[in-house]
Image (tube, helix red, strand yellow):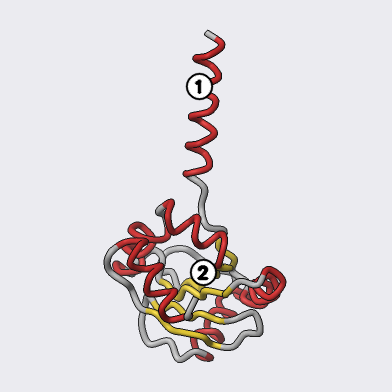
Amino acid sequence: MKKLILGLTTALALFSATAAEVTWLTDATKAQTQAKAEKKLVMLDFTGSDWCGWCIKLHKEVFSQPEFIEYANKNIVAVEVDFPSKKKLNAQQRSDNDALAKKYGIQGYPTLIILDGDGKKVAEMPYVKGGPKAFIAEFEKLTKR
């Protein structure tokens, strides 16, 4: 019985570790400070989280997958710059998101802007087909990692 409980506890712990998510920030300034301190890149995800089909697909096929989650948590400070249809953002968040979209000339969603810890634009990415492996390969190619 003890072995069964130990086995279930271990399986649950492994499942929990696998089921972890990317921590998405909404403050690009804080993200840049964190990225600089941790020697990571900032990934700004310009998205329409509740209406943009390609954005939803990107989150489902890439951002929620264990392979990407592990990679992102080691290499990226992720920022969601959301322009939802149904979900309400507070006025400050909406203003901040609008300013970021204007600053980077965002024309469509999803658009990913990659910055270094100093806030310098390193790369821009659209949706990448092929799941997390293809996404990570393209990310590394564009950021020369």
Q: Which percent across, then down, holds residue 43?
A: 52, 74
Please tell me whether mark 1 sits on a helix, a strand or a loop: helix
Q: Which percent across, then down, holds residue 92?
A: 63, 76
Left or right: residue 11 versus residue 56 is: right
Q: Which percent across, then down, holds residue 86?
A: 42, 64
Q: Quadrant of residue 96?
A: bottom right
Q: Quadrant of residue 120?
A: bottom right
Q: Which residue shows up at 56% across the image and 59% down it?
A: 73
Reading the image, the residue beneath label 1 is 7
Q: Which residue shows up at 67% across the image and 77% down it?
A: 29
Q: Of callouts 2 and 1, which one flags the residue occurring earlier in the amino acid sequence?
A: 1
Q: Quadrant of residue 79?
A: bottom right
Q: Which residue shows up at 48% across the image and 56% down it?
A: 69
Q: Residue furthest front?
A: 145
Residue in front for this viewpoint, 38 or 105: 38
Decide: few, some or many residues near mark 1? Use Cα within 10 Å; few <14, some 14-19, many ≥20. few
Q: Which residue shows up at 68% across the image and 72% down it?
A: 30
Residue in front for this viewpoint, 85 or 54: 54
Left or right: residue 134 versus residue 69 is: left
Reading the image, the residue beneath label 2 is 80
Please tell me whether mark 2 sits on a helix, a strand or a loop: strand
> Marks 2/1: CA distance?
37 Å
User: Which amino acid is tagged 1?
Assistant: Gly
